[in-house]
Image (cartoon, rainbow, N blue to C red):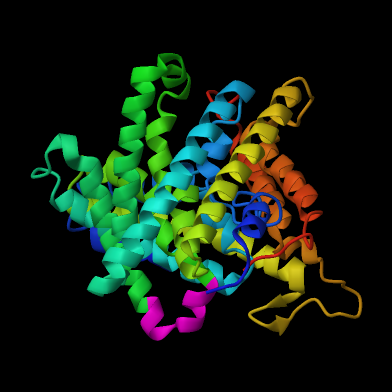
Amino acid sequence: MSETSAWVIFIAAIFTNNILLTNFLGMCSFIACSGQIRTSIGLGTAVTFVLIMTTILNYVIYHFVLVPLGIAHLQFIIFIAVIAAFVQLVEMFVERFSPRLYFTLGIFLPLITVNCAILGASLFMIIRKYSFIQSVGFGLGAGIGWAVAIVMLAGLRQKMRYSNIPEPFQGVPIAMVVTGVLAMAFMGFAGMVSIQ
Amino acid sequence: MADKQLACMTCQPKGLCGGRGLLTLKEGAWANNPLAIQVLGICSALAVTNRLENSLVMGGALIFVCVGSNLLVSLLRKRTPHRIRMIAEVAIIATFVILFDQFLRAFYWDMSKQLGPYVGLIITNCIVMGRAEAFALQNPPVLSIVDGVANGLGYAVILAIIGFFRELLGTGEIFEYKVLSGQWYTPNQLMILAPGAFFALGILIGIFNAVKGPEPGEKK
């Protein structure tokens, strides 16, 4: 088990090891949902919430159910089932308590299930052998990092609507290139803290 | 190319695909390329393409999972209740991913370590799920296999292209052979780091759009 403190992992997950800009997780909804700042804030919040909760749930399930029973190789299917069930729950809550957010997010809420960032965070947690506290820090940091990245891209894309972009590059390609620039900017944080 | 020929030769004379085999293949691998045109499953496309070798293994993994899950979903399509089809599809896909993951761990431990969580993340790869949902649920097994091969190939080829250029420009090597010599070429480290992946895929999709002409509905 690594010795890094949860706080360092939290900071690193946002800046130096941003789950989106360095690990490329959650790209699908990142590209599809970054048209407007408001939508992206909603989605970012939802992802952060789901991410931290499922990281905790999966940690408990992995270490107290799967490992003792010797079925750790089934982790993928168990994790995805936990995530799917949890997203369903969140969806019911949001629909009940914030219908406006529900309509804004529309189809993308169920899509959180297949957002690789969620499953990816759980898998990273297992691979890097985090302790419980470290996992909480990592889950929270990864979620916030993802939300920060998508809100930044949404802001940039709103501005870009008025720019003169070559025809073939309109839409997705330019979003990718801009994300590349963002990732480059985030590389400036490298060396501040480091985790593995 | 060889795969295309083979698929048509085994397929057309017997009419197993009902004459739609070739069309399905072309649709999946080129006209509706999952990566370059539909922009699905880009997470893994960005993450594993820092070396050509990784890209090829990942492409192979996706072909295997896509074919397997398409076949099984298609076989069970009349028995799966509509309401629980999603979770059934996820379970089927996860099964094949676990198979592949265990295979890598058993025989290619180094590769398994390098790919890290990205093998597991094939479960959440939108391509596999999308094909199961959009194609295998409505079509007979053999045609579904062809569709799986086509989409897997479409994905694998793009991955190989990106992997090739990133490794070549980033390290000057291909499969650890020096191609661009250190005398006149300074390896551009940026290409094997994260931003290079975004640039490479963005430019590739841009080129695809330019070649094919932009989709009327896609402009925003």
- Tell me which residue sits at (81%, 66%) in the image: B188
What secondary structure is the stretch in magenta mostly built from? Answer: helix
Quick check: can you spot residue A46?
yes
- Residue occupying image coordinates x 47% and y 42%: B31
Work out whether residue A45 or residue B80 is closer to the camera in this orientation and state it: A45
B7 or B49: nearer the eye?
B49
Magenta segment includes B1: no
Location of residue A66 (image quadrant): bottom left
Relative to B185, say whether B75 is above or below: above
Residue A176: quarter of image: top right
Magenta residues (range): B104-114
Image position of A148 (left or right of B15): right
Residue A129's place in the image compared with B211, above or below, is below
Q: Residue A27: percent from the left, percent from the top?
A: 55, 45
**Which residue is most to the right?**
B184
Residue located 46% across and 24% down the image: A105
Residue A194, percent from left and from top: 70, 65
Any magenta on residue B106? yes
Number of callouts: 0
